[in-house]
Amino acid sequence: MSAEAYDRIDDNPKFHALVTSRRRFAWILSIAMLGIYYAFIMVIAFVPEVLAVPIAAGSVVTIGLPIGVAIIVTAIALTGVYVYRANGEFDRKTAEILKEAA
Amino acid sequence: MIAMARSSTLKTVLPGALALGLTAFVSPGLAQAADAIAGEAQSAPLNWSAIVMFLAFVGGTMGITYWASQRTRSAKDFYTAGGGITGFQNGLAIAGDYMSAASFLGISGLVYLSGFDGLIYSIGFLVGWPIILFLVAEQLRNLGKYTFADVASYRLRQTPIRSLAATGSLATVTLYLIAQMVGSGKLIQLLFGLDYTAAVILVGVLMVMYVTFGGMLATTWVQIIKAVLLLSGATFMAVMVLAATGFSFETLFETAVDVHANSEAIMAPGGLVSDPISAISLGIALMFGTAGLPHILMRFFTVADAREARKSVFYATGFIGYFYILTFIIGFGAIVLVSTNPEFRDAAGALIGGSNMAAVHLAQAVGGDIFLGFISAVAFATILAVVAGLTLAGASAVSHDLYASVIKRGQVDEAQEVRVSKIATVTLGVVAIGLGILFEQQNIAFMVGLAFAIAASANFPVLFLSMFWKKLTTRGAFIGGGMGLASAVLLVILGPIVWVDILGFETAVFPYKYPALFSVTLAFAATWFFSVTDKSATAQAEEKAYRAQFIRSQTGLGAEGAAEH
């Protein structure tokens, strides 16, 4: 945990590459989640009738229902995708960087 | 006509979940039903199967508290359960911390009343979790020790930033606690036939015992057990509902549309979200507020490393999302099985105990008296788990941030810090009981909304910028966070819920119910402005210190490990 370890990490291009790719990944997923949620809310605020369309002729089930459930499932899936990559690829690279700095 | 009938039902039925705080976010109808809270919650006759199951829960958790007290010695044990909780366990505990009685009874009650709209709220409460994972969780774990203020003040001056963070934490925790206490008193009165004051005292005493004797370890296990009980109970109900409709969603929804007064309208958005400003503002409060709740953030320090912290959010999001889907089925199940049964309705045709009792009545409809007892006990356990987490977070803000860092400037021995924490827990318990009794007849609907607004406007911006923005200075963070806090409080007071509904003025000075869009923007803007214009020597030193913080936050180098046991 010496100051040199920090310098060695800072001088390691792998570290900066890792940070850049992890941040980009995290922001893309965040924007995807925010985009989906706010799109949903805006549809409800401005054109709620869009969600009232039945999924099939004669059915009482509207497309709003599968869409709502899909947003919940997407939220879970996106966290899964992030954890999969962060706990695999990103953690492996972090471990290498730490090893090289030791 | 239908609309009128609906809003008058709303006004008469609210006590339980109004108090539990869901309503602060819910509809104009719900939030305006200010006077509903003043209505008496009628006492039920003593419910023996519920009482026996509740006693079993209390007995079990007291056993766990004793076990935990044997293992809680150091400050690290007390605040973080030694840092040895696994990602899966923590995911369950987070879910147990977050799924309040308001989400269970309130959202299923909302689905019962207006169908699809209940789903909109569930989604709002869920989408903050992925954001916490992507932007906050691992850096928080890598930088912090016991409280989120550890992270916010990492390279800034301790006294102002810890004071600000502790104020934000205590404000959030106290408001949330009062709402939970009042809600629990009314709910227990309804479910168990226990007197309101006795119920509030009982909840207060139990939460203080869990926290003072068992610290984070006991709190975590109370939350895990509660999450498992709630998820199993809700799953059982959802399965029974589907069994009753031949495992066909089509049949379930068709029957619901047939019997519901609003007919097909329950399958589509129904105007709970109307103007875009309120919708966006509510979204911001839910999303960033969740990421600024001190009792939630604290849970990330109970795991060994960033890896487990990430896993916890994945499991938590999974459990919470699954739970919201269940509440949706339960709400529709109640429309089909409860609303059609005269046994559950009073002389006027309204649901006995109000729409928030939909899930409780459904429990009786699908599982008889024994299962009703089980669900009632689970509702009680749910409250206990949430208030215990809140109390621990509040006590930590007092002992770790105010006492150890601000008053003693870090020169304090662990035993003394833990002692202060326990005194703070007891004090918070007494305050919560006192305010819970005091606010019995008050409109507390705005409190959870305000708690989320403060978390989003004061806690989140400072925490977020401290991790992401190199040029953040003490002056910027203190003034920006302070302005976020002040503006959130002020705008809620001047807004329709407090200014008009409680204080009785004609029109609101600030037209929106949710201030977050404005107060969060102000907090970020002020933090930015007062940081970039800060040319002091400390500001330069703080910017220089970002490099080491950044490397630690990204790699975990030097991060707090798990305690050796």
Image (spheres, coloured by chain):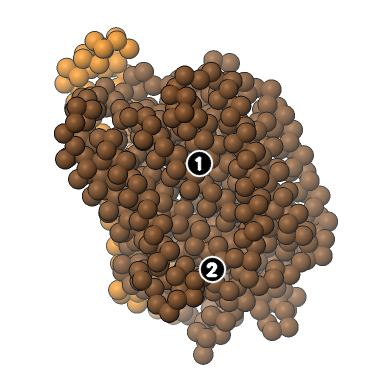
Depth order, front residue of B35/B71:
B35
The residue shown at (61%, 27%) is B419
- Report which colour depicts chain B: brown
* Amino acid type, residue under disc 1 in the picture: His
Q: Identify whether B292 is placed above or below B189.
A: above
Q: Identify whether B291 is placed above or below B69.
A: below
* Amino acid type, residue under disc 2 in the picture: Leu
State the image coordinates of residue B527 (x, y, percent, origin top left).
Answer: 25, 44
Answer few, some or many: residues within 10 Å of disc 1's Cα (few below 14, many 20 plus, some between 14 and 19). Answer: many
Give the CA distance from mark 2 to mark 1.
26 Å
Q: In which quarter of the image is residue A54?
A: bottom left
B562 on left or right of B363: left
Q: Identify whether A78 is placed above or below B48.
A: above
The residue shown at (69%, 37%) is B209
Q: Identify whether B200 is placed above or below B445.
A: above
The residue shown at (62%, 40%) is B427
Quadrant housing the C terminus of chain B: top right
Q: Can residue A44 be seen in this view?
A: no
Q: Can residue B46 be seen in this view?
A: yes
